[in-house]
Every structure is written in structure tokens, then in C-alpha cells.
Amino acid sequence: MDLLEDILIQERSINLQTLSEVITLAVEIAREGREGRKVGTLFVISDEQNVLATSKPLILDPLWHHPSSEKNIRNPDMRETIKELAQLDGAFVVADDGTVLSACRYINASAEGISLPLGLGSRHMAAASITKSTNCIAVAVSESSMVRVFDNGELISEIIPEIWLLKTYSSQIKGIYSTRSGGQLTVASKTTENIKNHSSHSD
């Protein structure tokens, strides 16, 4: 997707195809909701073993014991399953190869040193925290129909899937950013140079 090229830069140590698939699914959830209501959820992609070690299940995990062959993010049945499970609390953990390993997880990463704009809630704090403490990227879907991408503890992109939101849109991204629009989608991202300068993760 051309609109995502500022997010899908080669400097990221992550499977860019998996990230693209997750963002696309997140936008679908933001647009469609479920059962007539808006849905918020969180995806954490890559560095899956450290992410699993820094989180815990909120309920008996509905995905845990299913075969990996059935749980790839590219599988249409898996995508519909995710849309159903997105109504529950917690995050999805997605392996670098696109396997959705776990759902309904509580992210237990430290928020020390994380600074987010006012108005972003606990889901966004969890996204920023886990990307600061591990080598993952997080994609948060808000009930307000916004999709936000976090890397290295920072908000790096905002995706607006609804035309009507543009009238009141005000970017929360710090620093220099660019915007791209196409169809019914607008993407605001940190500039490529800005991303390169912040692409290394802290230990």
C-alpha cells in the first residue's frame, strides 16, 4: 500500500509484510467495528518471545493451542476470528512470520520514560511501553476509529480511515511529519529521516 511507505521502511528490524497485513486489518477493524459498535484493540508485532514474557493472559487464551498453520494473519478465517476477538480486552501477539500466537494479553512493560500526548489512554501507553522495552512494533486501534503505530516508545504514525474525521483531525505525532491521502484513508507519519534517527531500540 503506497500510503504506508513511510511506515514500511527497510530500517525496521521487522517483517514488513506482516506489519502491512496487521495495519490493513487494524484499519478494517477501525472502519467496521463489530456488531454495530466501534472496537478498540492492540496488536504487538515481532520479538514475540520477549513480548510473551512481558505480558500475561487476561483469560484462557482462545488462540494458544490451535495449529500455527491456521493462525497466520493472511488467512481469511484468522482475520475474521481476530475481528471477533478484538471485542475482548487485551492485546494480540503476532510473530514476525505473521502467526497470531496469542490474544487477550495484558501488557506488563514498564512505562518509565514514556511520554505520550494527553488524551491517549492505557492502550496507547501499553503500546508505547512494550515497543520501548522490546524490539517490536505496536498497532493500536482506538474506539474513535483512529489507528496509531508505535515504535521504540514513540508514536510514529496515525492512520485516519474515515473521511469525516479529517474535519477535526489534529496530529498527536511529535516532530516533523508528513501526510498522504488516498481513497478514504489518510496517513500521517514521522518523516523518513526522523524515523531513521530513532530506529534503534533501547536495551
Image (cartoon, rainbow, N blue to C red):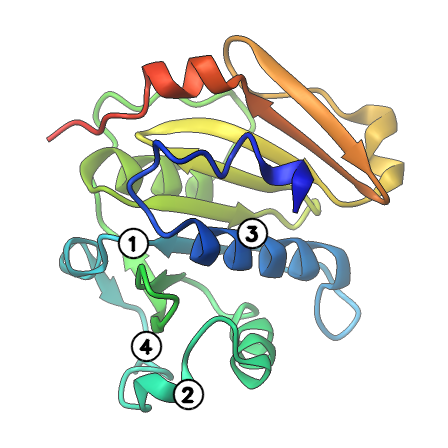
90 relative position to 146: left or right: left
Say which label, 3 or 1, has the lower sequence index. 3
Query: For the residues marked 2 and 1, what is the alpha-carbon distance in whole angstroms?
Result: 18 Å
The secondary element bearing badge 2 is classed as helix
Question: Picture quarter containing residue 153?
Answer: top left
Q: In percent of the image, x 51 and y 75: which residue is there?
A: 85
Label tally: 4
192 relative position to 159: left or right: left
Query: For the residues marked 1 and 4, what is the alpha-carbon distance in whole angstroms?
Result: 22 Å
The secondary element bearing badge 4 is classed as loop
> Which is closer to the viewer, label 4 or label 3?
3
Say which label, 2 or 1, has the lower sequence index. 1
Query: For the residues marked 3 and 1, what is the alpha-carbon distance in whole angstroms?
Result: 14 Å
The secondary element bearing badge 1 is classed as loop
Q: As shown in the figure, which amino acid type bears the numbered disc 3?
A: Ile
Q: Which residue is mark 1?
A: 46
Q: Which residue is mark 3?
A: 23
Q: Position of residue 182 (x, y in %)?
A: 82, 38
Say which label, 4 or 2, has the lower sequence index. 4
Q: As shown in the figure, which amino acid type bears the numbered disc 2?
A: Glu
Q: Position of residue 105 (x, y in %)?
A: 32, 64
The crowd level at tag 1 (other Cα within 10 Å; few <14, some 14-19, many 20+) is: many
Say which label, 3 or 2, has the lower sequence index. 3
Query: For the residues marked 3 and 2, what is the alpha-carbon distance in whole angstroms?
Result: 20 Å
Q: Position of residue 90 (x, y in %)?
A: 40, 62
Q: Which residue is mark 4?
A: 59
Extreme-left residue of the structure:
203
Numbered tag placed on residue 70 in the rendering: 2
Placement of the C terminus among the 4 image quadrants: top left
Say which label, 4 or 3, has the lower sequence index. 3
3 relative position to 61: left or right: right
